[in-house]
């Protein structure tokens, strides 16, 4: 359904040239399901990101599920340390696959779970950490990498909102054992629906391909196929299922669009970073939280968090409803709670599954009730951003 916002959450980032390329491909090719174009996009993405292997999926959500399925295959059933701020599939993948999510609190600086909170939550049952780079802010640091290695815990980077973000000059999504990206409409690039799971680990790469396509061994390497042919001689090699997989394959159409959009991904990242800089530079620092750690960010959206007013820094801010009114009157679309609508530990789907909370969730609870984000895209101008900020500063 059409909306009447002057400043939409996302812009139409599929260009006419993209549409022409798609039309030409559809008219001239018979195979439209997972094939050579998917493999080409996987290779181009791996080279751009700086990893050995990428496996294209039908969504970033599917990447969450495949990553947890791999953890379960390698480590068995147990606990997964998760952020309360992110997307629902960061948690739903954990509970649906029989694992127990353990929520730990985040930092206002980058909206990510902290090393100290991770350490306090680790038990002998801990199998993995899900680290989300929320709204394009870098979440990784040396201490988190060290914690995962020393405890033999798999580290999963959810980079669905952080294409091109960096830590020490290296792209996020290259530090953990597994990383996940989304190409949903409105992200830094889009395939409309689509995602990628990336790794430098050969075994994890094999599992990614297996879980993506029903668990069929014909999707895996020749070595893996020969192993199952030798040990399961009574099975048809074309229909041997090594793992309890899913159908999460993408199409050639999505890959063709992704390849075309890769031509402008670096520009998109830089423009979004510039927009965030203008946004934070002009916001009233007495009214709004602006002290984010912006080093290496790639800015998925423009966050607006009310500055805590009292010594009890997590008291609900009385001005927040006035901010929402200004955005409505200005025709600006927004989302309450920032990423994923705020604290996932509050969501009703968890009533049906076991979960744990380690420590207090004070920061995310404050963000849940006192924050929002608005769209950040390449069509925005400095004048648009500054004029809106002036109105917000008058609260």
Image: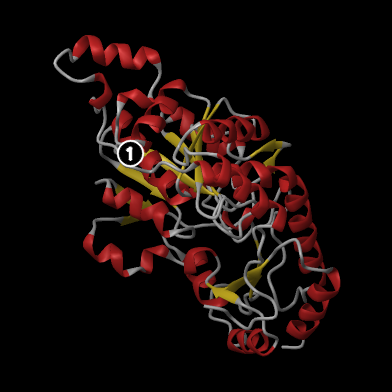
* Above or below, comparing residue 104 to residue 340 in the picture: above
Asked if residue 267 is positioned above or below residue 290 in the image, the reply reads: above
Taking 136 as reference, is 230 left or right? left
Residue 172: quadrant of the picture:
top right
Left/right placement of residue 169 relative to residue 334 reads right
Taking the image as drawn, is residue 181 in sight?
A: no
- Above or below, 297 against 88 in this view is above
Q: Position of residue 227 (x, y in %)?
A: 29, 12
Q: Residue furthest left?
A: 234
Helix, strand or loop under label 1 = helix
Q: Is residue 187 left or right of residue 130?
A: right
Quarter of the image where one finds residue 80: top left
In this view, the residue in front, 362 or 245, is 245
Which residue does the image show at 48% across and 32% down from the upper left?
177
The residue depicted at 85 percent of the width and 74 percent of the height is 383
Seen from this angle, which residue lies furthest right?
A: 383
From the viewer's side, name the closer residue of 1 and 108: 1
In the picture of the structure, the residue carrying the numbered disc 1 is: 69
């Amino acid at each position: 359904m059409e909306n009447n916002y002057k400043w939409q959450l996302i812009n139409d980032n599929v260009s006419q040239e993209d549409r022409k390329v798609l039309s030409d491909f559809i008219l001239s090719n018979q195979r439209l399901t997972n094939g050579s174009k998917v493999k080409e996009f996987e290779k181009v993405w791996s080279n751009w990101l700086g990893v050995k292997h990428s496996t294209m999926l039908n969504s970033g959500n599917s990447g969450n599920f495949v990553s947890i399925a791999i953890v379960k295959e390698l480590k068995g059933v147990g606990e997964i340390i998760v952020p309360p701020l992110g997307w629902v599939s960061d948690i739903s993948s954990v509970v649906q696959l029989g694992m127990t999510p353990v929520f730990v609190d985040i930092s206002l600086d980058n909206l990510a779970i902290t090393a100290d909170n991770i350490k306090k939550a680790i038990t002998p049952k801990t199998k993995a950490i899900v680290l989300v780079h929320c709204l394009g802010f870098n979440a990784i640091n040396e201490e988190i990498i060290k914690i995962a290695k020393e405890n033999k815990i798999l580290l999963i980077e959810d980079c669905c909102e952080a294409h091109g973000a960096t830590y020490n000059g290296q792209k996020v999504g290259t530090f953990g054992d597994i990383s996940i990206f989304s190409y949903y409409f409105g992200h830094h690039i889009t395939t409309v629906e689509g995602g990628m799971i990336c790794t430098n680990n050969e075994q994890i790469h094999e599992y990614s391909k297996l879980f993506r396509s029903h668990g069929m061994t014909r999707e895996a390497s020749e070595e893996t196929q020969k192993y199952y042919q030798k040990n399961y001689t009574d099975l048809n090699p074309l229909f041997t299922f090594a793992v309890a997989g899913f159908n999460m394959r993408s199409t050639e159409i999505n890959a063709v669009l992704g390849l075309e959009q890769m031509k402008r991904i670096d520009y998109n990242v830089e423009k979004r970073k510039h927009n965030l800089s203008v946004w934070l530079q002009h916001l009233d620092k007495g009214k709004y939280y602006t002290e984010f750690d912006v080093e290496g960010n790639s800015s998925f959206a423009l966050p607006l968090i009310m500055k805590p007013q009292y010594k009890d820094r997590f008291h609900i801010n009385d001005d927040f409803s006035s901010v929402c009114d200004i955005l409505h009157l200005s025709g600006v679309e927004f989302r309450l709670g920032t990423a994923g609508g705020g604290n996932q530990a509050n969501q009703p789907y968890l009533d049906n599954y076991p979960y744990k909370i380690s420590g207090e969730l004070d920061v995310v609870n404050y963000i849940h009730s006192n924050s929002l984000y608005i769209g950040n895209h390449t069509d925005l101008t400095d004048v648009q951003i500054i004029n809106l900020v002036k109105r917000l500063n008058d609260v």
